[in-house]
Image: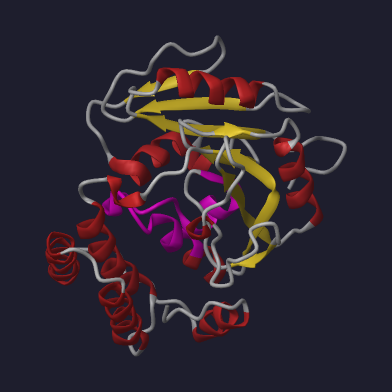
């Protein structure tokens, strides 16, 4: 990380389908207002034209929708191989809004103070109520969203990543398209010795939504859960992890169509290529366990 005399360079990647131009403009304005050196921004049109953006914001328009990880990977490469033209990359949802003007400076300070910190997960809060949904706190003990802590995964549309992590372990898994791509990167980063923090003081305003609003949600959640295990877990843990998640899914009593879609995705996860397998070391399993989330849940 760059020393204190030379502030860390910060970039931001935003992917858009072009259907939220007002929200995108508000997000970009909130990035432009950040304290300290300006944050360079790249907006990726994921299979769609990019709406009008402020001067100085770079754009990339893709001919097809590559999915969330694929689009973000294109944004990473816009900052040089593995994003290494900058020291830190922010990944922000196009309908989000940075709540504070010191978020980029807080990121610079956090990474400078902790040489093993690789990823920061921001707190997501509803702009009207200030409420943070339980699912947006990336740990099992999620009842207090105002408590910052070490965690084992992060939120895809509200985070900061040290680009050295991407250079070392690679970017997001393109194959996933949607769901669990953050955990795949998080596990690889943790296995390489990096740490992840959830920071309640780094806030992205985002409207409260349900993930199941996406038509492909149940199928891709199940498929990618299997891929995640096949790619990253030691062989003995794969059936345990997937068995636990099957029980949890059934306990939530989804609708019959949702359950059918889930089992379709689960089967697809076993019968389709998932990318390279690089099982984490057992000491990483122990680290995840000590952090409060063993890789069986």
| Residue at 76% across, 51% down | 110
Examine the rendering and report whether any part of residue 241 can be seen. yes
The picture places residue 68, in percent across and down from the top left corner, at 35, 43
Number of on-image labels: 0
Between 285 and 100, the one lying in front of the other is 100
The picture places residue 139, in percent across and down from the top left corner, at 55, 68
| Residue at 17% across, 66% down | 259
Examine the rendering and report whether any part of residue 160 can be seen. no
Quadrant showing the C terminus: bottom left
| Residue at 68% across, 54% down | 199
Report the side of 160 relative to 2 (left or right).
left
Report the side of 179 relative to 111 (left or right).
left
Residue 113 vs 18, above or below: the answer is below
Between 252 and 70, the one lying in front of the other is 252
Report the side of 20 relative to 257 (left or right).
right
The picture places residue 13, in percent across and down from the top left corner, at 50, 34
Residue 282 vs 258, above or below: the answer is below
| Residue at 29% across, 85% down | 239
Q: Quick one: which residue is furthest to the bottom in this view?
A: 236
Residue 8 vs 253, above or below: the answer is above
Q: Which residues are magenta?
A: 158-186
Q: Quick one: which residue is furthest to the right in this view?
A: 5
Question: Which quadrant holds residue 9?
Answer: top right
User: Which colour style is shown?
Assistant: secondary structure
Q: Is residue 160 magenta?
A: yes
Q: Is residue 180 magenta?
A: yes
Between 234 and 256, the one lying in front of the other is 256
The picture places residue 237, in percent across and down from the top left corner, at 37, 86
Question: Which quadrant holds residue 244?
Answer: bottom left
């Amino acid at each position: 990380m760059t020393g204190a005399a030379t502030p860390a360079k910060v970039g931001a990647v935003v992917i858009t389908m072009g259907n939220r131009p007002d929200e995108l403009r508000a997000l970009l304005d909130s990035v432009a207002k950040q304290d300290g050196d300006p944050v360079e921004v790249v907006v990726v049109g994921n299979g769609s034209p990019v709406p009008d953006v402020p001067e100085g914001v770079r754009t990339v328009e893709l001919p097809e929708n590559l999915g969330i990880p694929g689009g973000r990977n294109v944004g990473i490469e816009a900052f040089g191989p593995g994003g290494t033209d900058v020291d830190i990359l922010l990944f922000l949802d196009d309908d989000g809004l940075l709540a504070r003007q010191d978020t980029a400076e807080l990121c610079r300070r956090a990474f400078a103070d902790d040489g093993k910190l690789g990823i920061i997960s921001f707190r997501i809060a509803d702009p009207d109520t200030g409420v943070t949904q339980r699912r947006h706190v990336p740990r099992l003990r999620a009842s207090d969203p105002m408590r910052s802590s070490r965690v084992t995964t992060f939120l895809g549309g509200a985070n900061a990543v040290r680009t050295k992590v991407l250079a070392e372990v690679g970017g997001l898994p393109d194959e996933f398209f949607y769901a669990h791509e953050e955990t795949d990167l998080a596990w690889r980063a943790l296995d390489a010795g990096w740490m992840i923090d959830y920071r309640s003081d780094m806030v992205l305003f985002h409207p409260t939504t349900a993930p199941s609003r996406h038509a492909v949600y149940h199928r891709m959640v199940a498929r990618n859960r299997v891929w995640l295990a096949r790619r990253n877990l030691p062989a003995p843990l794969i059936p345990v992890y997937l068995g636990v998640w099957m029980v949890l899914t059934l306990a939530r009593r989804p609708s019959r169509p949702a359950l059918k879609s889930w089992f379709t995705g689960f089967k697809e996860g076993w019968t389709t290529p998932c990318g390279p397998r690089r099982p984490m070391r057992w000491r990483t399993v122990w680290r995840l366990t000590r952090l409060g989330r063993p890789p069986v849940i």
